[in-house]
Amino acid sequence: GINDEDFPKISVIVRFIGKNELCERTRLSLLKQTYRNFEVVLVNGGCKSDVFEWEDVIVRNKPALDEGIRNSVGKYIAFCENGDFWSQDHLQKKAEIIRKCRGSAIIVNDIEFYGDENSCRYLNVIADDCRSFFLGADRISDTLWKEHHFMLNLSCCTIKKDCFDTCNFQG
């Protein structure tokens, strides 16, 4: 079997923002991951709760982010915005960091915006929403945020699931 310490299950949460279907580019980037011990949790306010499979990847539908996090089965949660795509080794690199730095709670990477001006503007809105979420309600201190000079949005975050145990998603 798979050793959960060396190869932890990762739940990938994909949020839909104003879209009714998963972007094909996002779906394909998830299916092409070299690291295979993961599930996908689709979060969309209008979806029905279903479980289905893409090739060998289990997919769950949940209507809200907090429900998606609570019902995920991974030891770590990675976020991927609908429309984004990851390199094939994205989850593999995260798993290697988890293995080398045992006890890591939050793993982030830089992101690259590309596309037309409207697409980049849309992505900046998402990044601002993420900043508000993490800085609000004392989730991450403003000092810690300012010490790092990278653009942080949910698509670059992998967070140990038990970090969410005390989160107040209503605040």
Image (cartoon, rainbow, N blue to C red):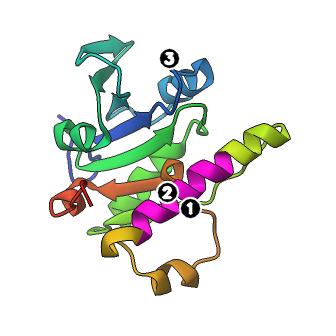
Going by the image, does 125 lie left or right of 119?
A: left
Q: Is residue 52 above or below residue 126?
A: above
Distance from Cα at disc 2 to Cα at disc 1:
7 Å
On the rendered structure, is 122 left or right of 68? Answer: right
Circle 2 residue: 130
Give the residue furthest to the front: 171
Residue 100, quarter of the rendered image? bottom left
Helix, strand or loop at mark 1: loop
Give the residue displayed 53% in from the left and 32% down from the top: 82
Q: CA distance from mark 1 to mark 3?
A: 24 Å
Q: Earlier in the sequence, mark 1 or mark 3?
A: 3
In the image, 35 versus 86, the foreground residue is 86
Q: Where 16 falls versus 95 (above or below)?
A: above
Q: Residues within 10 Å of mark 1 (few under 14, many from 20)?
A: many
Q: Earlier in the sequence, mark 3 or mark 2?
A: 3
Name which residue type carries label 1: Leu
Q: Residues within 10 Å of mark 2 (few under 14, many from 20)?
A: some
| Residues tagged 3 and 2 counted as in contact (Cβ below 8 A) | no
Query: Is residue 127 on the magenta stretch?
Result: yes
Q: Which residues are magenta?
A: 123-135
The residue singled out by tag 1 in the image is 152
Secondary structure category for the residue under label 2: helix
The picture places residue 26, in percent across and down from the top left corner, at 56, 27
**Residue type highlighted by circle 2:** Cys
Q: Is residue 101 visible?
A: no
